Image: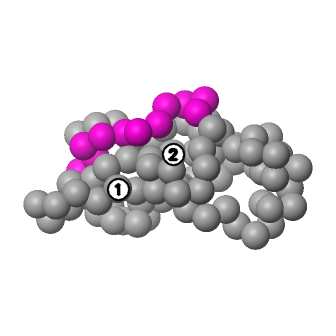
């Protein structure tokens, strides 16, 4: 088994001109998984909010959640670790 860290993806280009996103006001609205959960690729891990838009962040890998690095209300930057998966 190996570990894979899911990181905050690059913000879509349209977010760069958004008032909320450009000022760094992107925060985690809700965590949708818990430690121990087995998830599939593209299953949603969390929901972000910018004040204007809510966006679900999916997992790029299948695996079991072994650590969650963020909590609801945290602000996140591109590349920030979100969760660690145990993958086969």
Tell me which corner region of the image, top left, top right, bottom left or bottom right, holds residue 37: top left
Whether residue 50 is visible here, answered yes or no, is: no
Check disc 2 and report the residue beneath it.
Answer: 46
Which residue shows up at 55% across the image and 62% down it? 9
Magenta segment includes 58 = no
Report the quarter where the N terminus lies.
Answer: bottom left
| Residue 17 image point, x, y percent | 87, 61
The structure residue drawn at horizontal position 75% and vertical position 45%, both measured from the top left corner, is: 24
Over which residues does the magenta segment extend? 64-74
- Nearer to us of marks 2 and 1 is 1
Residue 70 falls within the magenta-colored stretch? yes
The mark found on residue 5 in the picture is: 1
- Secondary structure type for disc 1: strand
Q: Residue furthest bottom?
A: 13
Residue 51, compared with residue 64, is above or below; it is above
Quarter of the rendering occupied by the C terminus: bottom left
Left or right position of 50 against 33: right
- Left or right of 40? Residue 50 is right
Mark identifier at residue 82: none
Residue found 78% across the figure and 60% down from its top: 15
Q: Position of residue 54 (x, y in %)?
A: 69, 47
Q: Earlier in the sequence, mark 2 or mark 1?
A: 1
Q: Nearer the viewer, residue 2 or 29?
A: 2
Q: Are marks 2 and 1 in contact (CB under 8 Å)?
A: no
- At numbered mark 2, what does the secondary structure look like: helix, strand or loop? strand
């Amino acid at each position: 088994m190996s570990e894979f860290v899911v990181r905050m993806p690059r913000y879509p280009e349209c977010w760069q001109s958004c008032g909320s996103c450009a000022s760094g006001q992107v925060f985690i609205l809700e965590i949708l998984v818990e430690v121990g959960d087995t998830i599939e690729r593209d299953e949603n891990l969390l929901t972000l909010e910018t004040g204007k838009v809510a966006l679900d962040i999916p997992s790029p890998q299948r695996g079991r959640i072994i650590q969650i690095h963020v909590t609801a209300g945290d602000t996140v930057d591109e590349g920030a670790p979100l969760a660690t998966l145990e993958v086969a």
